[in-house]
């Protein structure tokens, strides 16, 4: 399997446009952006469980 070139990217974008339509794509991108933002926030915040060392009981 080779690298993804410009032709493949255009083909993928055309398929996405056909599947979701022009009006749904901004909503889809907004949802993806919010999901990534929440993931980064959850990754950066530490819970009390993660502050403990691995293998510690207390």
Image: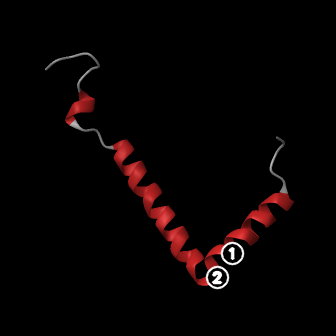
* x and y, in percent, of residue 33 in the image: 49, 63
| Residue at position x 69%, y 75% in the image | 17
Q: Classify the position of the C terminus by image quarter.
A: top left
Task: State whether residue 54 is above or below residue 15.
Answer: above
* x and y, in percent, of residue 19 in the image: 65, 74
Relative to 22, 3 lies left or right: right
The residue where tag 1 is placed is 17
Q: Secondary structure at mark 2?
A: helix
Residue lying furthest left in this view? 58
Relative to 13, 58 lies left or right: left
Q: Secondary structure at mark 1?
A: helix
Q: Separation of disc 2 and disc 1 at Cα?
A: 6 Å
Task: State whether residue 48 is above or below residue 39.
Answer: above
Residue lying furthest front in this view? 19
| Residue at position x 20%, y 34% in the image | 48
* x and y, in percent, of residue 23 in the image: 59, 83
The residue where tag 2 is placed is 22
* x and y, in percent, of residue 51 in the image: 25, 29
Relative to 28, 43 lies left or right: left
| Category of crowding for the residue at label 2, using alpha-carbon neighbours closer than 10 angstroms: few (below 14), some (14–19), many (at least 20) | few
Task: State whether residue 23 is above or below residue 3.
Answer: below
């Amino acid at each position: 399997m080779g690298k993804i070139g410009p032709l493949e990217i255009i083909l993928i974008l055309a398929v996405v446009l056909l599947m979701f339509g022009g009006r749904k794509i901004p909503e889809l991108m907004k949802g993806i952006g919010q999901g990534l933002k929440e993931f980064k926030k959850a990754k950066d915040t530490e819970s009390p469980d993660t502050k403990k060392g691995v293998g510690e009981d207390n």
